[in-house]
Amino acid sequence: MKILILGSGGREHAFAWKLSQSPLCDQLFVAPGNAGTAQVATNLPVAATDFEAVADLLRQHQIDLLIVGPEEPLVKGIVNFLRAKEEFASLRIVGPDQQGAQLEGSKDFSKKFMDRYGIPTAASQTFTTENLEEGISYLAAHSLPIVLKADGLAAGKGVIITEDRTEAQDVLRQMLSGEKFGAAGSKVVIEQFLRGIELSVFVLTDGTNYKILPEAKDYKRIGEGDTGPNTGGMGAVSPVKFATNTFLKKVEEKVVQPTLSGLQQENIHYQGFIFVGLMNVKGEPYVIEYNTRMGDPETEVVLPRIQTDFVELMAATADGELDKVNLNVSPQTAVTTVVVAGGYPDAYEKGHNITELASLEDVTAFHAGTATGQNGHVTTNGGRVLALTALANSLENAVQKSQKAARTVQFDGKYYRKDIGLDLIRYQD
Ligand code: AMP
Ligand code: GLY
């Protein structure tokens, strides 16, 4: 099979790494990719959102299977664009169409969807410029803290949580005026604050059948002890101790099944990943958000635990034959530590040489933001630079190996969190 992956982060390197291990993979391409994907695949210099150029790649390389990594091309409708062309009628695509991608592309859509199908989530109300004044008085009486969410894609930054009603009112005005988050803030969802522990659950569906992939915990904040601003993710662990079988069964029955049957009732033929961001509130799952793709850095701990041939799994998703595949998962623990550029998630520098990559032992170094410099040297090319994943028989060992690798690699301004997984080591029911 000839396979093309769209995207350039750690998630896409993990996909490429996994797919390249399959005997079913004949040729593997990543567009645009990074210095890590170049080690296991051929990079093609095309942006994932340049649909015409992607169509050219599909033709030129006679691609059989397309996997769309990030949300942006999905929300912009790459699947609809390709499906409208007869020449791609038999192309296998992993990724939802534009309607399905609304689960991530519009918080208002996803909240209404959850309400229609009785899926547990925080109570909410949506406001636009039309009912701004109503929103202002709604906030005056809202319980604290208040959660405000820009409706559209905002690169993980569209959520504001505040204890201050006046600040919430200012934020609402700034979002609706377009001052904050531009068009993504033209609708704002205001919702109740959920108190609990977060968990990422991943579902792979072919439109009818589904598999629940290994769950993961993501460390979103920049600082140790979950402090400071949100990032794309500073580390991840899988499996997650508090995700007991009882809890996961509730997730399947109260969230996954009604989500999939809701999609079917709305005639949304969804083939791809659904990433459910959940809050465990006293043992009950509440959906914080849907994403219509895999998580990053969660992919870097989920895929190393999947033992089933990944090409087979992806092809079965696109063929509507997931019921014919067994999902085998390793009982080992995977931990990834993300090494980032100094300054991230604010402004940061690019182009620094990365050294000591070759001396890493016992880890897989997924490249999140790297490029190959002029002299062939691997350089930093993003905020998140590397996701260093260790797989071990215990959480403690996996943490140690991943952290050791994070200490070992070097580049100017390097930063990483030293507490990835420590809360789970300490966790007790
Ligand atoms: P999102 O962009 O929807 O993932 O939100 C970013 C982060 O905000 C989430 O990962 C949570 O940590 C937090 N968050 C979002 N919604 C809520 C909520 N209703 N209650 C508490 N925390 C929330
Ligand atoms: N790690 C969270 C995300 O991929 O959205």
Image (spheres, rainbow, N blue to C red):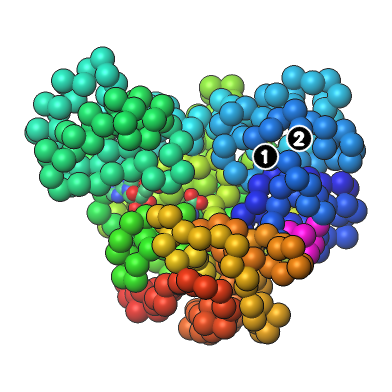
Q: Which mark is residue 358?
A: none
Label 2 Cα crowd, 10 Å radius (few <14 / some 14-19 / many 20+): many
Residue interval drawn in magenta:
37-41
Which quadrant of the view contains residue 146? top left
Q: Secondary structure at mark 2?
A: helix
Q: Which mark is residue 54?
A: 2
Q: Is residue 260 above or below residue 131?
A: below
Q: Horizontal and vertical percent for residue 427?
A: 34, 75
Give the residue displayed 42% in from the left and 72% down from the top: 417
Q: Establish whether ligand 2 lies closer than 8 Å to the Cβ of label 1.
A: no
Q: Report the side of 352 relative to 160 (left or right).
A: right
Give the labeled residue for mark 1: 48
Residue 91 against residue 28 in the figure, above or below: above
Q: Is residue 37 left or right of residue 197?
A: right
Is the residue 278 above or below the residue 216 in the image?
above
Q: Quadrant of residue 178?
A: top left
Q: Give the quadrant of residue 160.
A: top left
- Quadrant into which the C terminus falls: bottom left
Three-letter amino acid code at disc 2?
Val
